[in-house]
Amino acid sequence: MNSKNNDNQPIGYVIGGSLKDNLRVRLTLPPQEIQEGSFVVAKSGSWKFYGLVTDIQLGATDPRFADEQSETRFPPALAAQLHGQTLYANLEVLSALMMDVGPDPASPTYAQDYPRWLEDHPEPSHPAPVKTVPSHHAQVFVAEAVDVAEIFGDPDQEGNFVIGYTPEQQHPICIHLGRFVQRSSGIFGATGSGKSFLTRMILAGLIQYNRAAVLVFDMHDEYGYDDTASDTSQKVVGLRSKFTAKVSIVGLGRGASIRGNTPDYNLEIAEKDIRPEDIEMLTRELNLKETTPATLEALVNTFSPQGWYRAFKQMKVGSTIEDEDGKRIPAPDSVAAWANQAGVNVNAAEALHNKLNRVFNKPYIVANPAADSLFNIIKTLESGRHIILSFADYETDLDYLLVTNLLTRRIRSKWEDLTNQCRSGKAPEPKPLVVAVEEAHKLLNREMAAQTTFSTIAREMRKYYVTLLIVDQRPSQIYDEVMSQLGTRISGWLGDESDIHAVLSGLAGRDALRGMLTRLQPKEEALLLGWGVPMPILVRSRRYNDQFWVDLLRGKKQKPGTTKQMIEELGYE
């Protein structure tokens, strides 16, 4: 930015627009001085209007002036004067918020106007959604630090977490962590866009400032222990390394090892904890038939909710014996014998048993676990500490679907009970819980959403202090009803039109923001939207490096790095 903008001189003036459409601003600077995504302020009377630049358009008073290269035909001074009169650039500004800030102190009548305004406004003014438009020729400025802090919060105020900076002036942009955890949220971006780093930073903020207990389903062992970035070969610090006393690592299965490290304890699932709904959730993965629910119901009726799984596992398919007449009949321990006794179709029962062999053979499902790991996880989270569940060697979709759904089902039941006790005055308020889920489309697609507990959490569980943080590269594959419940959305670059549409669904100004998502820098920019931020804003995200941890653990805001530092961190030098 040039010196004019640094002195907070106007960059243009309003020439048109409406509430339905964007404001149009005539730019009084060269167009390259302003970028898409700039945070700007229009001052009109006692009001400030806060908006986001979504487009920059070149124009001319006559098409001939744009077509002709007058700088080659006229002396430079004359050509420059002609350009200033005939060629121009307009900004499209998505106006999002407005605030009555009172008379301009520079006004000659300020001494008379301000007391009257103060009398009419005894309460402090706050930003509110736009309900009107600025007047013609209202001056437009690039937002100053005070404007950014007014809208997004003071970085030094408790609860505000700096997630990035305005692209041009490098003013810090905050999200309020207390507000962030009140609703489910999503972090999206194409592969390699840095969404895992954004997730690590937000989780680190939640842990450091004790805003919520955190449960991370770490399918690819990225969040617990230190790792190495695949593109830069630099060390990536794990959450456990910095929060040794606050974060517990749980490995799936006995003897699990995570990147050569031994977890704090292992998760083994007792056979009695498997419920029919956990199996029905695997319908697509196991290719189960429509007869499955009836067969499972019969098993529960015969052997109880706690005993059906083990009993069914021990049955044999095709086992026969000879009766007194020498005929082959189903053996007493066979699936067929039970099916005949329970009035279930034998073929359906045997087919289900064959398909469930993939589950029966999972080593982490045992008859008698060494410890009640599920109970330990729930108690740890209930106390406000944090769990990273590593899947270690079990990285198939079947493992992920089964374990995550079973655990969240228990969590849902526990937090509903805690909340009900709190509301009846029998217990204190439960600790908010954030469940972070990678590869969310595997659990929350249209076919699975109705069967998993995750969908219930996204729709209903915020009133029970449980919310989701879903991380995914294909938001278009997530059920639209779940997407509509996401309060805060943080998106890196997305190239697929259907993914862009999904991220922006249900948001005001989505048409204006669509192009911005396609033009984000692939690694260092993100668009913040929704409940957790007062208005859409483009940020250059903080770098997840040693300086981030120094600032976080000392309670300081991180200063933006130099261009050279950013290039080195990206691995280009």
Image: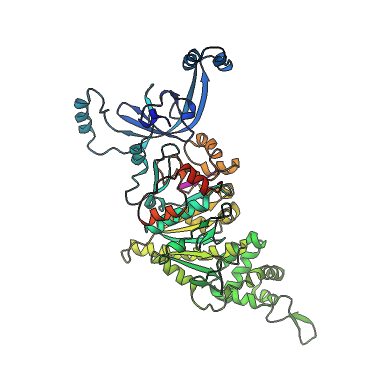
- Residue 22: percent from the left, percent from the top? 46, 29
**Does residue 21 show up?**
no
Near-viewer residue (532 or 107): 107
Q: Name which residue lies at 39% across and 43% down.
A: 172
* Residue 492 falls within the magenta-colored stretch: yes
Dominant secondary-structure state across the stretch colored magenta: strand
User: In the image as oriented, which residue stretches furthest toward the front?
Assistant: 573
Dividing the image into 4 quarters, which one contains the N terminus? top left
Q: Position of residue 11 (x, y in %)?
A: 41, 26
The image shows residue 151, relative to residue 373, as above or below, that is: above
**Residue 46: x and y, percent?**
29, 28
Say if 113 sits above or below 389 in the image.
above
Question: Would you say residue 128 sits in the magenta stretch?
Answer: no
Using the image, determine if residue 165 lies above or below residue 222: above
Q: Which residues are magenta?
A: 488-493
- Residue pictured at 54% horizontal, 16% vertical: 71
Rendered residue at 50%/63% (across/down): 225
Left or right position of 222 against 39: right
Q: Nearer the viewer, residue 227 or 274?
A: 227
